[in-house]
Image (tube, rainbow, N blue to C red):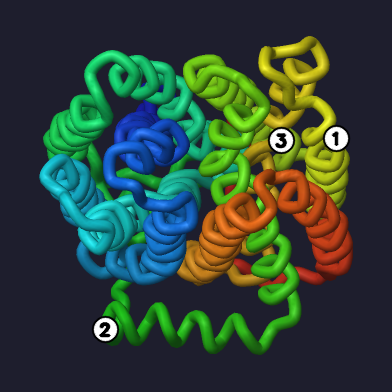
């Protein structure tokens, strides 16, 4: 029995790397549950407007996306482990120091800049990097599972953050996020490796070892060069445009503003937080299922279905919000949860088909557009709320954008470039 055959009969180390990456993304997701719960407490304590707090979240979301391609290039150069550990420390610093803030510029610096850089380094670019390097078989499934980590983090943290904020104040809840980020860092430091070659293994599902690549040039130069190369291809702009709308209609609008929108209709914040957390429950199922479908179906068709369904749901939401959780609102939560980040596995698959070895960095830029869209929606919905007294116009606008996103995805051509990937073998 050869060494490679023996390795395939045992638990492949790729699954250990994927599991620890899942935990790291889950820990970083703790902050993603904070903004919606804490918007009203910050407004009441400091007198900051919804637009001001939304601006901090906008900076956070923009950096969350814009950091991704540079983090992906840095992981190519330094490895996954130091980048992820450093990012967790940044998250801990930003959230921990925020308990001492007294001015809105400090909110923007700590929650916006520091946490934005930290969470951006543990974003979907990490998902693409791990799935592309460590897996040939089951890539779509692994992508779905790792993407679901963010939703799982929201599921775990959101009710706890809401409860702690209600009983003990927002500072205690924020310190929980700090503690979790610091606790996850040592696990990453011990277990994660950057390439299968570091363990003397082929990628999962491959037939032969793949030498650790040598990357030339600086990190920033490589990230920018990948952007300029991708920008010459129409498919990049189609994916970036659709993913910007994805970010606007999830992180930017719903995650940031669902709780205050529900409160506008008389719903208690703890009830609204629980509903938002349930989106995370269904998101786990939807994203893993989307990864499974991505391994088997046309990614373009999947994306069209996801965006059209999301648009219909958003168009109906203003009529569903009341002072309590009605059956129709439960249906919305179920559907929106299944659809929330189901777009990620097929979008990464399309990047991989068209951009090959540059997948992780190119998808980093596509994800940057996702967060730019989220940032625009976060601050834009806040201004709409301040100006009109409600969120209905924001929901209707987002519904129309989803239809545009579906059209952009359908326009992605079927033609693929050669990826130069190792040969895969069937895996049971």
- Element class at badge 3: helix
Label 2 to label 3: alpha-carbon separation: 37 Å
Disc 2 residue crowd, few under 14, some 14–19, many 20+, Cα 10 Å: few
Q: Quadrant of the N terminus?
A: top left
The residue at 21%/29% (across/down) is 180
The residue at 69%/59% (across/down) is 245
Label 2 to label 1: alpha-carbon separation: 48 Å
Q: Which residue is labeled 1 in the image?
A: 316
Residue 421 vertical placement versus 253 (above, below): below
Disc 3 residue crowd, few under 14, some 14–19, many 20+, Cα 10 Å: many
Label 1 to label 3: alpha-carbon separation: 15 Å
Q: Is residue 298 left or right of residue 119?
A: right
Residue 218 bears which disc, if any?
2
Between discs 1 and 3, the one toward the N terminus? 1
Residue 316, quarter of picture: top right
Residue 83, quarter of picture: bottom left
Position of residue 30 measured from the top left corner of the image (x, y, whole percent): 34, 33
């Amino acid at each position: 029995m050869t060494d490679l055959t023996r390795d395939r009969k045992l638990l492949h180390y790729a699954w250990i790397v994927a599991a620890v990456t899942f935990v790291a993304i889950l820990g970083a997701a703790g902050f993603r549950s904070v903004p919606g719960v804490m918007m009203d407490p910050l407004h009441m304590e400091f007198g900051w407007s919804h637009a001001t707090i939304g601006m901090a979240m906008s900076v956070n979301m923009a950096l969350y996306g814009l950091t991704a391609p540079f983090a992906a290039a840095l992981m190519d150069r330094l490895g996954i482990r130091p980048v992820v550990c450093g990012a967790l420390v940044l998250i801990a610093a930003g959230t921990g120091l925020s308990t001492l803030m007294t001015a809105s510029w400090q909110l923007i610096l700590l929650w916006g800049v520091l946490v934005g850089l930290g969470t951006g380094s543990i974003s979907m670019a990490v998902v693409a990097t791990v799935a592309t390097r460590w897996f040939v078989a089951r890539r779509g499934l692994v992508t779905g599972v790792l993407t679901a980590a963010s939703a799982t983090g929201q599921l775990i943290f959101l009710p706890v953050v809401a409860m702690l904020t209600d009983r003990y104040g927002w500072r205690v809840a924020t310190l929980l996020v700090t503690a979790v980020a610091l606790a996850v860092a040592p696990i990453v430091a011990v277990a994660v490796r950057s390439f299968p070659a570091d363990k003397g293994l082929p990628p999962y599902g491959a037939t032969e070892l793949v030498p650790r690549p040598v990357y030339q040039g600086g990190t920033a130069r490589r990230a920018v060069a990948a952007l300029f190369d991708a920008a010459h291809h129409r498919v990049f702009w189609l994916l970036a445009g659709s993913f910007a709308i994805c970010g606007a209609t999830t992180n930017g609008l719903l995650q940031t503003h669902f709780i205050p929108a529900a409160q506008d209709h008389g719903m208690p914040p703890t009830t609204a937080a629980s509903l938002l957390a349930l989106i995370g429950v269904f998101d786990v199922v939807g994203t893993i299922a989307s990864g499974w479908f991505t391994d088997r179906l046309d990614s373009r068709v999947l994306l069209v279905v996801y965006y059209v369904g999301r648009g219909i749901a958003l168009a109906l939401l203003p009529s569903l919000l009341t002072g309590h959780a009605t059956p129709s609102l439960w249906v919305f939560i179920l559907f929106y949860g299944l659809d929330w980040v189901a777009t990620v596995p097929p979008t990464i698959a399309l990047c991989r088909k068209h951009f090959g070895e540059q997948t992780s960095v190119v998808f980093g830029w596509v994800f940057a557009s996702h967060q730019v869209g989220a940032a625009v929606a976060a601050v834009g919905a806040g201004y709409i709320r301040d100006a009109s007294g409600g969120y209905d116009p924001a929901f209707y606008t987002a519904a129309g954008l989803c239809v545009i996103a579906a059209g952009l995805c359908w326009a992605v051509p079927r033609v693929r470039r050669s990826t130069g990937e190792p040969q895969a073998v069937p895996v049971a």
